[in-house]
Image (tube, rainbow, N blue to C red):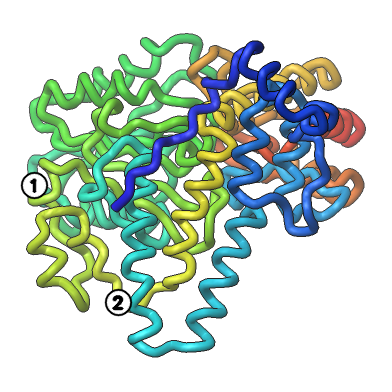
Amino acid sequence: MTTRTPTDASHLPDRRRFLKRAAAGAALAATPAWTRAPSKLGLTIEELSDRRDFPGTEDEAFWEMVKSQFPLRPGLILMNAANLCPSPYPVQEAVFGYTRDIDQDASFHNRAKFNALAAKSVDALAELLGASPEEIVITRNTSESNNAVINGLTMGAGDEVVLWDQNHPTNNVAWDVRADRWGYKVIRVTTPPAPESEDELVDAFVNAFTDRTRVLSVTQISNISGVELPASRLCSIARDRGIYVHMDGAQSFGAVEVDLHAMGCDSYTGSAHKWFCGPKEAGVLYVRADRVAELWPSVVGVGWDGASAGGGADKFGTFGQRDDAAVAGVGTTVEFHQAVGPAAIEARTRALAAALKAAIRERVPDVSFHTSDVPGLSAGVVIAELPVDDHTEIYNRIYEEHGVAGALRTAAFPGIRLCPHMYNTMAEVEQVADALARSV
C-alpha cells in the first residue's frame, strides 16, 4: 500500500517561502486562506491541509476555522473530550457515504472493497502511532482492547499485576475479575495528588515491583485526575525488569503525539470516539510484534486461519460482522488529524488546558485542581474542585444557563471535569471560567 508522508505542524513555511507564495497569488494573499468561509459542510481534507500551510497555525483565526469543521450546536461550549467528541464534517460524510453504499448494495461483491479500506485504515493508524501495520488491529473501543490484553495474557497463582488506582475500570476492575478466576495478585499504586515531578510518579510504581511482578498496566493520562504519567520512562524501567507493560491510551490517542515504538510499551489501546474525533464504535489495539505470539485471542471467528497464519495482530480482530463504514472512516479521521497536524493539536490542547486553569483560578480564588500544573505531567483533562460540598448543582447550572458541557466527578477526585480540544477557542475558555464563577 502507498505510504503517505505525515503532515508535521511544526514545519510551517518560513517568511521567504510565504512571501514567494503571496507574490505568486495576490488574491490569495489579500484573503488569507485560513480566514475564508467554509462551505456548508466544512472544508475538504485537502483544503484544510492547504490552509494549514500558512503561518497561521498559532493564530486564533486558524483554530476558529478548525472549529467550523465540526457540527457543534450554536451556543454550546463542549469540553467533554475525555468522554465523547463530535466528528468533523469530512469524517461524518465519509461514514455516511460508506453506510449508504452498503445499504444500497449489501452483496458480497460490493462489500469486498471494504477489505482494502479496512487495511488502509490500519496502515494510516500505524503511521500515526509509530507502529507497523502488523501490530495494529481495529476494535470497537478501548474497553474491548483492554480486555483483549487482560484475557490474552497467561497468568497464574504467584504472579503479580501492578495497576494505577487512577485507571479506568476496564483497565482496573477487569483485572480483578480475572484474578478471581486465575489466582494472581493485583497490586494498586497510589500516586501523590497534583504531582510536581516525574520522580514522584515513577517511584510510586517502582516501589511496588517485586520479583513476582509480571505486568504493569497503567493509563497514560488519567480520566480521573488528568495526571499524565511519564510513559516512556516507566516502560523502560519495567521492560528492563522483564515486566510486560500495557498502556491505556484512551486520553492520549488523538490528543497528544504518540510514537509507540519510541514509548516502548508492549500493548496500547484507544477509542476513536474520544480525542481522535472519529467514528463511534471504533478503537485501536496495538500489540508489539514480539509479544503477539504470547497473547491468546478473546474472540475467534470467521477468518481465524488466515489471521493467525499471518503472525500479526490480525489474530485479535476476528470479530464477525463489523460496521464496515466505521472501520473505513478511521482512515479518513487519520487524514483529518494529519491535515491539522498532530503536533499542532497537542500544543493547542495543552495551551487550552493551561489557559483554562489560569482563568478559573483568577475568577474562583478558592478553586483547587487535581490536575498537575507541571508541564508534561498533564494534558487536556482538567479536574477543578470548587469550594462546595456537592458539585452536582454547578455541573447542571453551567450547562443549562451557560451552555458549558463538562463532566461531574465524585469520590476520590470530586469536581468538574473540563476537557478542551481543537474545536474550542480561547474565548470559550474565558466564558467557561466566567460560568463557573457565576455558579459557585
Residue drawn at (28%, 46%) of the image: 286
Could you say where residue 337 lies in the image, as x and y percent from the top left? Answer: 53, 41
Pointer 2 residue = 320
Residue receiving disc 1 = 157
User: 361 or 115: nearer the eye?
Assistant: 115
Residue 84's disc number: none
Left or right: 142 in relation to 355: left
Crowd rating for badge 1 (residues with CA inside 10 Å; few <14, some 14–19, many 20+): few
Place residue 347 in its image quadrant.
top right
Question: Total marks drawn?
Answer: 2
**Residue 338: horizontal and vertical position, in percent?**
51, 39
Q: Is residue 229 visible?
A: yes
Determine whether 112 is above or below 297 in the image.
Answer: below
* Residues at circles 2 and 1 in contact by the CB criterion of under 8 Å: no
| Residue 307 image position (x, y, % from top left) | 16, 65
Judging from the image, what secondary structure is the residue with disc 1 in? loop
Query: Residue at 53% of width from left, 87% of height from top?
Result: 104
- Residue sitting nearer the eye, 92 or 386: 92
Residue 223 against residue 11 in the figure, above or below: below
Q: Which sits earlier in the primary sequence, circle 2 or circle 1?
A: 1
Q: Residues within 10 Å of mark 2 (few under 14, many from 20)?
A: few
- Residue 292 or residue 5, whichever sits in front: 5
Q: Which of label 2 and label 1 is nearer to you?
A: 2
How far is mark 2 from mark 1, CA to CA? 33 Å
